[in-house]
Amino acid sequence: MNTAAIQALRPLLSTSRKIVLVPHKNPDGDAIGSCLGLYHYLRALGHQATVVAPNDFPQFLKWMPGAEAVLVYEKDPRAGKAAIADAELVFTLDFNALDRCGDLQVPLQKASATFIMIDHHQSPDNYAQVQYSDVQMSSTCEMVYNTIEALGGLDLLDAGAASCLYAGMLTDTGSFKFPGTTPRTMRVAADLMERGAPHSEIHRNIYDTNRPQRLQLLGRALSNLVILPEYRTAYITLSQEELDAHGFQKGDTEGFVNYGLSVDGVVLAAIFIENRDEKIVKISLRSQGDFSVNDMARKHFNGGGHINAAGGRSEESLKDTTERFERILATYKNELQAS
């Protein structure tokens, strides 16, 4: 964390405060892990900390210490609004624009609290009084660790906090295989293990505890795999009917897009998932090398993220969305072939 941000943050945490921590809508491992890791630290400092999530998060993350205390706004909007209205400080973690919070955006915009952003995505909005933004970081959880270290608070990280931060680092680095993983990332992970994060148990909880329906849904997704050699691209589709037929639960499709990227010669992978309730198609994009899916998502799919991992949405049908995607690929053909 840069010196100016630490100097601004330190006095804000010098006395007991009412603090709310917020992840983005449809929170993933890094969003929940960073919120809960910081939550444990702030409580150890003597603050009144509350995590308010816009909506629910996947079952495979609910083993995290403190997960039971997360206030889910879509389930209890009155309590969520009250917590935000009462807060003196609001930490927004793993996102950098308030519209990433869904229905929680309005209460946040009305809040009188001081905002602190900790995030590693590109093009941050200017809503936070204290901002720690670094697109080179592997995960927001690594950034939370850096923040606590800069504040001199690592001794307050117990096994619970360490487990939450380790889990977020694990998921956002693809088990430490993505390009953003640095020697520093591995040293932070090692320190979290030394502080009590049970790495094998965490990996098993996240990756190796599957409902039969999820594995069957994966089989369906792989049978829908389309490979476009001329564009070095692969994509997967899942319709609402296919999701319903396999008892879809939040988080079931986590990681499915990476199977497309594992195909020999593929540098761009996508998954298109129909969501009839929201009347959209959710899109996840992954790439290898220098091809920026962040640019593609921002330009064509009302989204964004990182160079090699991004997301977006389409309000067209699933069929029309994939057809448009294939047309868009033609404009990137030379870039994809050169990657």
Image (spheres, rainbow, N blue to C red):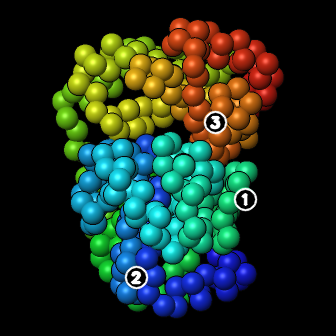
Mark 2 — residue? 47
Q: Quadrant of residue 199?
A: bottom left
Q: Are marks 1 and 2 in contact (CB under 8 Å)?
A: no
Residue plotted at (53% across, 11% down): 317
Residue plotted at (70% across, 54% down): 124
| Badge count | 3
Q: Farthest left residue?
A: 212
Mark 1 — residue? 126
Residue 230 relative to residue 186: left or right: right
Marks 1 and 2, how far apart in space? 26 Å
Residue 6 relative to residue 177: left or right: right
Specify few, some or many for label 1: CA neighbours under 10 Å numbering under 14, 14-19, or 20 or more.
Answer: few
Q: Position of residue 132 (x, y in %)?
A: 65, 68
Q: Position of residue 321 (x, y in %)?
A: 59, 14
Towards the viewer: 291 or 305: 305
57 above or below 79? Answer: above
Marks 3 and 2, how far apart in space? 35 Å
Q: What amino acid type is highlighted by mark number 2?
A: His
Residue 21 relative to residue 100: left or right: left
Element marked by disc 3: loop
Residue plotted at (37% across, 68% down): 50
Q: Position of residue 77 (x, y in %)?
A: 36, 49
73 above or below 182? Answer: above
Going from N to C along the chain, the mark reached first, 1 or 2, is: 2
Towards the viewer: 122 or 189: 122
Specify few, some or many for label 2: CA neighbours under 10 Å numbering under 14, 14-19, or 20 or more.
Answer: some
Residue 262 in sight from this viewpoint: no
